[in-house]
Image (cartoon, rainbow, N blue to C red):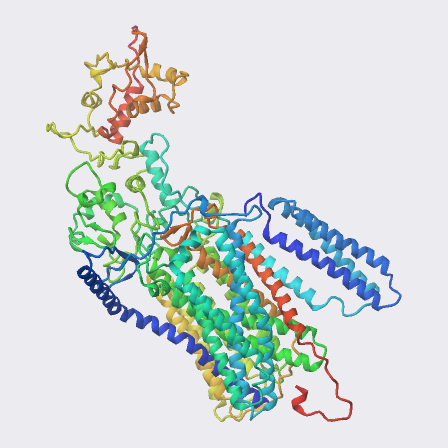
Amino acid sequence: MLGKIKRSIATFSLGLFLAMAMYIVPGMTSDAIAKEVFAEQVFAEEAFAKEVLAEEAVEGEGEAEIEWGQDVFYKDWEGNPLKGPVSGFPAPELGESDYNNYEFAPSRMLLWVANQQHLYFGSFVLAVPIFCMLIEFIGIRSKEEDPVMSAKYDRLAHDLMKVSLTAYSWTAILGGILLFTFITLFPGFFKYMAGIFRPVMHVYALMFLAESGVLYVYYYGWDKMKEDKFLKWIHVSLSVLLNLIGTVLMYLANSWATFMQAPGGIDADGRFLGNIWHVIHSTLWNPVGVHRILGNIVFGGGIVGAYAAYHYLTAKTEEERAHYDWVCYVAMFIAIFGLIPLPFAGYWLMKEVYAFRQQMGITLMGGIMAWLFIIQAVMIGLLFFGANSYLHNGMSRVKGSHRYMKYCKYMILLLICCFTMWMTPHTIVMTPAELKAMGGAQHPVIGHFGVMSAKNTAVNLMITTTVLCFLLYQKANKKINVPWATVGNCWISAIFVGAACNIIFLGVYGYFLPANVRVGLSVPQVTTTLTTLFAGTAINISMFKDSESYGDIQWGTQSKVGTYAIFLLAISFTWLMGLMGYIRSAVRLFWHVTEVVRDNSVDAYTLTIGEAGKMLTFNTLFVWTQFVVVFWVGSLTGKKVVSKAPEGIPVPAQQQQ
Amino acid sequence: MLPEQHDILFSFIAILFAVFGIFVFGNVIQNCREREGLNIKFWGGIFGAFAIGCFLMTVHMFDLVQADQLKFFFSTYILVVLMMLFFWGVFFKSNKIEGQSPPIIRGFFFWCTVSLLLAGYTNWLPQQRSDPPPKEAAIVGDLTMEEFAEMGRVIIFGAKQVAGQKSIGKGQCPLCHTFDPGDNMGRCPNLFGVEERSHKRIKEDRYASSPMAIGELEPASGIVKGSPTDIPEEYRRQHGPDELTGEDYLRESLMCPTCYVVTGFGKDGDTKSPMPVIVKPPISLSRVEVNAVVAYLQSKDTPGEFASVTVPLPQDDAGNTGGAIAEAPDEDEDRPVFVTGNEDIQAMINTLGCPLCHTIPGVEGAMGELGPVLHEKTNAPNRIKDPNYKGKATNTKEYVRESILNPGAYVVFNEAEGESFPDGLMPTTFGEMLSVSALEKVVDFISQTEAPAGS
């Protein structure tokens, strides 16, 4: 049984990795390639447009009356702003009549709530089909080897899809509310956006139709296509199609947000320059897309984990407890798997932000948004505590884990130290007297922890500790039998000790370098952390060959602390997602579309951190209230009477599942 | 949220608590019905009262505005909910009911507690609200150079300064630049001593050729390097020498950052500046704002001393003034009159032509009669108190300064003739004829004028 689960998890990991690569690699490489080929492309476009104009000039009565505008972002191959034929109206100078409001709340808050709720649900319904695709695929692959596990995977995928179906309708309703909120409260701005994105909006609606069609066939055809092998493959192919359409949908919607933050395809007056691809494919489009896919996976994992954790707490039978304990594990595995590459997607996004406008990047990292990144640090600290707490508690139900449990307290101590360093602010608000008493804006000792050198060191050590914890979890119930076990353990120890030394050395070295050089040290630090992840995991798994088991994982014996750790992770994911979304959106400051359409409403100010925090908490509580309702609605159709087998009659293993 | 609006978070939590009150009531009734011997009326009455109380308090929350809602929530509502939880516990314990609260309730409180702690943490941090900058700085009344430089400081740093926290104004300069000696964050050059450097930089060989030669057009900004006459008309310096000055360098740095990139602070081998063009979005400074920033940069290293400032004051900024370059007037009649402040007071007053109209004690030959006699030490305080006075001065110096720069602010009554002195006779162009230092010297002198003893 252990071997089968091990193989399933290995297949599952491979599947996740491939799926992620499928999403990320094209995005990243296409961006790099696009930049290279772009010069030629725009040259060809300009040449074509000039030819057309020349022909029109010959055929017409005189010169074609087409005005040329300079793109605010795109450049030609000489580095000059790209020119395009002006094809739209200039951005409006919005006035009082372009904004409506209700008395009970500012329009901006209402739009924020509508937007955030739609995004949360959208994120969930986009993530669940990814899980279902992978889980169903693993179920098919393991059917011959282990029909019990295969059926278990299939049931899990089906259950998730059932919940997702209700959530899908809910998402559509919230989307409608968002649209009406936009149209009614910000009519002037919406008119401009609709003018630019008119064709995209129609394609989006059609894609939504396609998504709905495939989703319904996929879900309602589940049982009919379950038995026949060929039909089952068709069924799983439908999930691939579902995910592709979902991804296109998300990317189309992303283009509106990324255009607002870093526009392209228009001139300085906001006039459309005739190429809709330039408007869609603005500079932040790719990194935001990848970041959101990963974020969706993490968030989806968090929701499914919390859903399973709740059912685990309410389970009446041992089978049920074992099942939901296992689902918790799978969900957390998916969430953490998505979480690990998420910071790298974030780095990519920030790099593009800096490339677009340096002062926008600095506003985020060193300006008015900087405190929000301290809060982000706290949230990430919570995530690491939650994840480690779950792993520590999860480990305790694995036979043989007593060998490693003694290390947990040291890992927690290290996490606390790193977390404290990670959340130490660079400067804080002080009275002049306090400032004088401290001898400057930074504390003479603690102030050293406020800079990026310390923070990069802290977070890399935290990730490395979590990786170590995961490796110990993996080998908790295994008695290693390979002849090179000692060498392997030495290698793993050497990798982790070496990594810690290197991370700390680079962190300290950073204090002796100027800021602009110091930034570059984050690359070798992150590389070191990744080395522990990949090399450590590879050696660890290699050592499992011919290993003996101390016993199966005792599913259904997860402690309450571990279960609440999953709740903590789910809350943290939700809150953090809202926070980062707010930061990304609020960095536009007083612009609807950066540098093009100014926000002239009474709500154009940037909120205080406290106000923003309250809104984030409200959004978190509100969306989870809705999730509870959606899960309850989803469960109404699934309540079956469990028929108990009479005592003394043996029950086949498949039916026990 | 505005103060007169509801607090969206605590209004929502009030609703959740009302639902929770109903849930607890239902749970108690259900337990009473399932078990014999429990006093359903007693327990139902208690928890029914709690449920109704929660409902009424939730309704009351919507009668209040933000601050009052918070006060009510934490002083009353939360206590009632805690009491309800306590009684619920008593109900379970006294009746020996196991199982107690279902996981959904424990999850709900866990969820609320963690989320509210996060919200509390964000409210514990320093709060700074950032209002959008005005589209253009408003000029109210006449400004002194000190006030004009202060306007530049506000554009750079914002109106509010909080100790220990970097404050950033419309110009967003402190995001990258530092201003104090020895302070260097590594993003962009430290601007301490920039006024002095501005005069030297334009003479450096590197300036002439890197990253582009003088006379070349920088496409992103549309500025021709080192050519003040090619600056867009609305920003152009219209007076002063034809050659490049320190003021031109500062203006060019703002309007065309890539025209010259300080070594080590540029991109692509110091050929491009990361700084935005300051007169274009998102910063979009107007001419007056650019001049105010230049005035601040020229004067910030010499507090209280504005002699190095060469940009014109905005009230003189009718489009025909500019570099108040301190150079001695020559004999060329076509050259506009300009007083630098280096002359003696007699020469200054004569150059300006004051004696033609005014009688000024202490100035030889100043016996003019077209304007009032200048006995300002004694007259000015009385004129400020005059009900007909519409100016803004509060003391003698301010009154004299105002009279020079804006003569129409108060027209003196000619008691000998029984009518006011003619309005509009006195020129309004003294602002462009005086350097800041010269103006202050003239003001100081005139403020002390009084009738000779015994007259």
Q: Work out whether residue A343 can be spotted.
A: no
Query: Relative to B82, does residue A236 appear above or below in the rendering?
Result: below
The residue located at (67%, 79%) in the rendering is: A321
Numbered marks: total: 0
Task: State the image quarter where residue A640 is shown.
Answer: bottom right
Q: Give the image location of residue B369, x and y in percent.
A: 23, 11
User: Residue B409 appears at what percent x and percent y?
Assistant: 34, 22
Q: Does residue A558 show up?
A: yes
| Rendering coords of residue A251 (x, y %) | 43, 68
Left or right: A468 with respect to B290?
right
* Horizontal side of residue B251 vs B390, given as left or right: left
Going 35% across and 14% down the picture, which residue do you hit?
B378
Residue A481: x and y in percent read 53, 92
Relative vertical location of residue B172 with respect to residue A584 in this rendering, above or below = above
Return the residue nearer the eye: A227 or A154.
A227
Left or right: B113 with respect to A113? right
Q: Residue at x 81, y 66 (%)?
A: B31
Q: Nearer the viewer, residue B436 or B237?
A: B237
Q: Residue furthest left?
A: B332
